Image (cartoon, grey):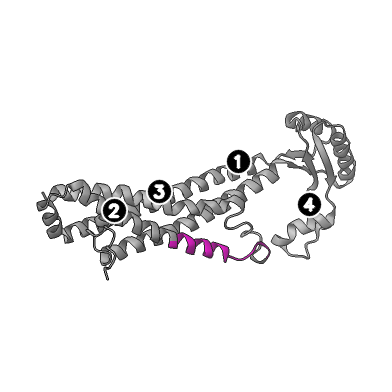
Amino acid sequence: MRLPKAKPASPATRALQVVPPSGPTGWLTTFTAGAMAFLCVFALALSLASGRLADRWSEALARTATIRLSAPVEQVQIQTDAILAVLATTPGVASFRALDEAETRALLEPWFGPDLPVEALPIPRLVELVEADPGYDAQGLRQRLAAEAPGATLDDHTRWRRPLAEAAARLRLLGVLSIALIGAAMAAMITLAARAALATNAGVIRVLRLVGAKDSYIARAFVRRFTLRALGGAGVGAAAGMAGVAALPATDAAGGFLTGLGFTGTGWLWPLALPPLAALVAFLATRRAAFQKLRELT
């Protein structure tokens, strides 16, 4: 009875056999790729969530404005009525209302406690307005208020929106820089691992050269092995990071500041790009290190 002949190994399989399948360099590459991918997932989640939070705050402030009225007690109601009359005839104002003492007390309660005597303090009367689309002429409204209610001041929240918009842009930039630094660190670690593997297998490389193997064949073996290790490690790290983000407290349990922390909607697709990116970084780093080390071993 004849046994079937084994199929000859493909060139890619034979090339992979040049590099030992295990050892310190293999574990170092896999662990580095996994750890860096895990950190990248959280860097992405935090930067995207912070950017969304700042955008949401900025958008909410962009559609609202506040009119503060500071006037003598006998003039407060008269000037309040004048403000409401001006707003009623101002194009671009969707809605408006004067806040009563209970609402003012609720606004100040987090800072001064629940027993604040609002009626006994010189607190300005507040009128809230919501901008329509298209909006109102802020400068024109200020001039009309100055004529009808001299104690009124329009605050369109511009000084609040600008820092929030800048914060959102900087948070996104910090996220990109963090991911770039993580990628650079991973490339450096994989480069060291590849050079160590090449140095360890210097005798094997010399034998391969004696039998006619070209440096491109030897380098391809190391590049393929380290690229696959990085791809696998990054896949595990990204999956662990996504599981960690999914396990974060829900919005209603976390509270105000943590609202929306993590990924939402199509944002969950971003971590899926990390393993291919890690493999690409490993490919480029290992290829460069392999040819450099092979030239040194010449």
Which is nearer the N-term, disc 3 or disc 1? 1
Q: Residue type at mark 3?
A: Ala
Q: Residue at x 29, y 53 (%)?
A: 12
Q: Residue furthest front?
A: 1
Residue highlighted by disc 4: 122
- Would residue 124 appear left or right of 19 to someone viewing this image? right
Q: Which of the numbered marks, if any, corresponds to residue 180?
A: 3
Sequence-earlier tag: 4 or 1: 4
Q: Which residues are magenta?
A: 236-252
**Real-space Cα separation, disc 1 to disc 2, in angstroms:** 56 Å
Q: Which residue is mark 2?
A: 12
Return the residue nearer the eye: 156 or 260: 260
User: Mark 3 or 1, which is nearer the eye?
Assistant: 3
Question: Residue at left 52%, top 61%?
Answer: 242
Q: Name the kind of residue labelled 4 in the image.
A: Pro
Secondary structure beneath dot 3 equals helix
Q: Is residue 248 one of those drawn in magenta?
A: yes
* C-beta proximity under 8 Å, tags 4 and 3: no
